Image (cartoon, rainbow, N blue to C red):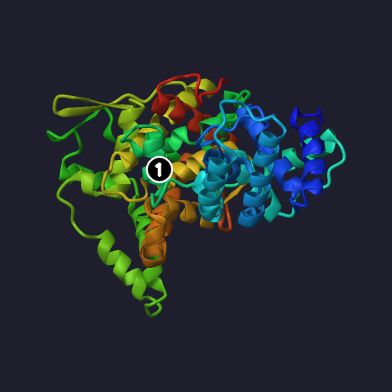
Amino acid sequence: MTAAPHRLLLSHFTNWSKAKGRDVDVQLLESLLDLRATYDDLEPTLWPTGSVQDLLLRLVPAKGPTEPLSSDAVVEALDAYFRFLRSTGRMSARSATPADLAKEASRSAKKMTAAARDQKNWSPTKSMINFGESMGISLDDLSTTEELQGRLNEIAAAWNDLPIHQRQRLGPGEGDLSGRSAAMAAYQTDDEIYALIRSFRYEMPQGELAPPSQVAPLIREAGLLDQLEALVRWIEPRAEITGTGVLRPAVARQAFADLRLQAWTHEWLRIDYADLESELQPGEMDLILDTFAQQPWRSARECRALDRLWNAALACQVIQNQGRWAYAMWPEELTDEGIVNLATRAGLGLLFSYLDDEMFVGNPVLCYALLRSYVRRPHPIPQAEIEEFGLDWSLRPSDRDRLTDIYRPLFRNSLRRNLYELGDLGIFEQTGEEIALTAWGDVFVSAWLGLELDRPDEGLRSQ
């Protein structure tokens, strides 16, 4: 390390303090002067009024050690140092008197411990170093800069591997705010989905996406396009629609039956009511689900199985509404690129139909699942992690203990339902209690981010 200007000064101070019979922690004083020189570029002889308070209550908490310094030792070291500067003629003329500076040190020292332990005062680097120490990665006793850099890289890799909501919890806080409130304030927006996406901006992967020749087979295997084609063929050449742009109820009921959507509805309901099954006798769940599935609906919008297909078909324009008629427009021939484009538009239609539902509490949970899987691909993401994000995003820290048992089942159910509803799109793979994006999912999420951010250079990669 290059010698700092105050090294020689400290050598003279050590001799002076010994001659005066003062027992001073010179190493502690050196660490304080190191902080001033490194981060504020202040001369070791310049101490105007307020400079001691700034050192002890701003700089030391932000950049100093994670454990609070000894207040008594700090006051004693600074008092001796100020007297040394004045008595040897080294004190800058713009400095306060040693007596006033000592009083300032004594007042500030009473608040040092609280300031040092309040992580809102910590710098991001200090938060990371503390995180490294909690993992057993210490920056002490290092012999070379290469070794130091290696430890820092190890800490950074482990830190970046954490879910973003855990990093926010471990990093400097902004008071009793939920993740949602903190992110919206940080990015100055009232759109929580935009704020969530922006919080991932520095983790976005680089490089090229999988080509259509690799993605198209995954799309065909997933099954959504087959269902869309079946719906389009069913209404060929056209079908009458209502003023709200959906099939008339009688026609919709016939489409529901002919397209065999009962099974999809039954399974969707089973997932929605999964937590109820453990409280029922064998067979009772099926009876309840059959009853729900057969309930009449006044509008095709009320039939989830049909409505999702309709939204997807309109989004990719294989069905086009004109006046009181819906016209079938299935392409005569689809290349691999055409399949990817068609599935992307259809999938975005599904996704936005879910995100536009303001009453749906799980919207951020679904978006987090997409974003976290995107930046971690091909590594799987535990569903429990996604639930934890939902809690941190929605609840203030002071409300976690009281409301976790209420909110956790909501997030768990919404995630299960979303994964099922997007299952035939094929963007996720599920293994046990983990999910991972497919190569097709990587393409899809990139397209979604390009629309959400409205800037192709952020999140959208090329094929």
Q: Nearer the viewer, residue 3 or 263?
A: 3
Q: Is residue 94 above or below residue 296?
A: above
At 60% from the left and 45% from the top, the residue drawn is 127
Q: Is residue 381 above or below residue 356?
A: below
Residue type of the residue flagged with mark 1:
Ala
Residue 284 position within the rendered picture, expressed as x and y whole percent measured from the top left: 34, 75
- Farthest residue to the bottom: give it: 281
Relative to 378, is 367 on the left or the right? left
Residue 57 position within the rendered picture, expressed as x and y whole percent measured from the top left: 53, 45
Residue 76 position within the rendered picture, expressed as x and y whole percent measured from the top left: 66, 51
Task: Look at the numbered disc 1 and give the secondary structure of its residue.
Answer: helix
Is residue 115 something one can see in this rendering? no
Residue 310 position within the rendered picture, expressed as x and y whole percent measured from the top left: 29, 37
Is residue 200 something one can see in this rendering? yes
At 34% from the left and 36% from the top, the residue drawn is 352
At 40% from the left and 43% from the top, the residue drawn is 182
At 22% from the left and 44% from the top, the residue drawn is 301
Q: Nearer the viewer, residue 339 or 78?
A: 78
Q: Is residue 209 above or below residue 171?
A: above
Image mark count: 1
Q: Is residue 332 above or below residue 201?
A: above
- Callout 1: 10 Å neighbours few (<14), some, many (20+)? some
Relative to 393, is 25 on the left or the right? right
Q: Which residue is mark 1?
A: 182
* Quadrant in which the N terminus appears: top right
* Quadrant in which the C terminus appears: top right
